[in-house]
Image (cartoon, rainbow, N blue to C red):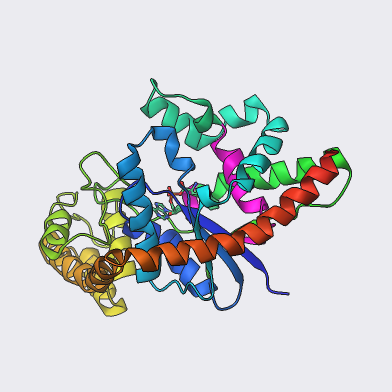
Amino acid sequence: MKRIVVSGIRPTGNLHLGNYFGALRNFIRMQDEYNCYFFIADYHSLTTHPHPDHLRQNVKQILASYIACGMDPEKVAIYAQSDLPETVELYLFLNMNAYLGELERCTSFKDKARQNPDNINAGLLTYPTLMAADILIHKADYVPVGKDQEQHLEMTRTFAHRFNSIYGMDYFGQPQAFNFGSNLVKIPGLDGSGKMGKSESGNNAIFLTDDDAVIRKKIMRATTDSGPVEMNQQKPEVIANLFQLVKVLCSEETYKSFDEAYNNCTIRYGDLKKQLAEDTIKFVAPFRERIQEILADDAYLEKVRRVGAEKAHESASKTVREVRNIIGF
Ligand code: TYM
């Protein structure tokens, strides 16, 4: 039996390199070996009340990006979370066994509540139970995600284990966060601190849809410091972050030569940024072009989504039927 893999990305805009290296790259690499369900987390995006037109457009954008990055609809079930209302029923059941204290202690809840004190809604609080429902609805073994989702996976295991204990059976497994070959990934942003993500200005992230000029401009503006003053000194966070981007986007020789230049204090950040910009453009351009092509084909996108939803529905309806029976309905 093939192991089961589930993951998703919220349709809050275009995909950035953090999404790609943290999650999507793994999705593509897993599709041959595993039984994969990859969705667009449109229910989750409702915590910020998007306009219906934006929601529709963003879902389509992520769907096209999945395919443009190499996801094969013949191998993988690709669907929108909202195509699978079974998830909502499991979410309700899991919410009955999720405690206020543990939900309030969740880091992503605390961060979002701090950033948007006027919109601390119940959907935000129960974000981890909906995510657990997405995963447990297919009884997943592995969940490819970036580092920032690690705690949500821990909570998923807690909810699964609690359900099993309450009903005295070994129904749900313990899904694991997954990254090929190593620890979960965190791609830093261009502002030198924290992770790459959507910001107000959009300047902290490189999107798979950014054109060459935009990529150059964003990278040339990335935060640096005034340069090393001692041989072999440790890199401060802003510089270590920039080097991490070089590591994922440039060749090993390029990384080594800038690392040496840093260590002997001859580095010119302008040169590093120019090289990083050119390598990033080389990486992004084919994806951007392919996304545009696929976006133009509405009939194809709809078909992919419909076929994916049917496959996901088969597995989800079985789980919900069994869970209802276990609960006593
Ligand atoms: P979201 O939409 O915030 O991010 C999607 C995926 O991209 C990863 N990611 C990153 N990885 C590395 N470095 C970064 N800078 C970076 N930024 C984003 C995230 O870790 C994630 O894997 N809750 C999820 C969506 C979701 C989901 C699920 C995922 C809903 N249900 C069930 C897995 C299983 C989220 O908000 O991802």
Residue 120: x %, y % from top left = 46, 24
Q: Can the viewer see residue 144 in this picture?
A: no
Residue 242: x %, y % from top left = 26, 58
Displayed quadrant of residue 49: top left
Residue reaching furthest to the top: 118
Q: Describe residue 7's horizontal placement relative to residue 251 as left or right.
A: right
> Is 139 a magenta residue?
yes
Nearer to me, 240 or 250: 250
Q: Is residue 239 above or below residue 46?
A: below
Nearer to me, 71 or 60: 60
The residue stretch that appears in magenta: 126-148
Residue reaching furthest to the right: 168
- Which residue is located at x 50 percent, y 58 percent? 79
> Which of the image's four quarters has the C terminus?
top right
Q: Can the viewer see residue 171 in this picture?
A: yes
Residue 302: x %, y % from top left = 41, 62
- Which residue is located at x 68 percent, y 60 percent? 315
Nearer to me, 38 or 118: 38
> Which of the image's four quarters has the N terminus?
bottom right
> Is 312 a magenta residue?
no
Residue 140: x %, y % from top left = 66, 59
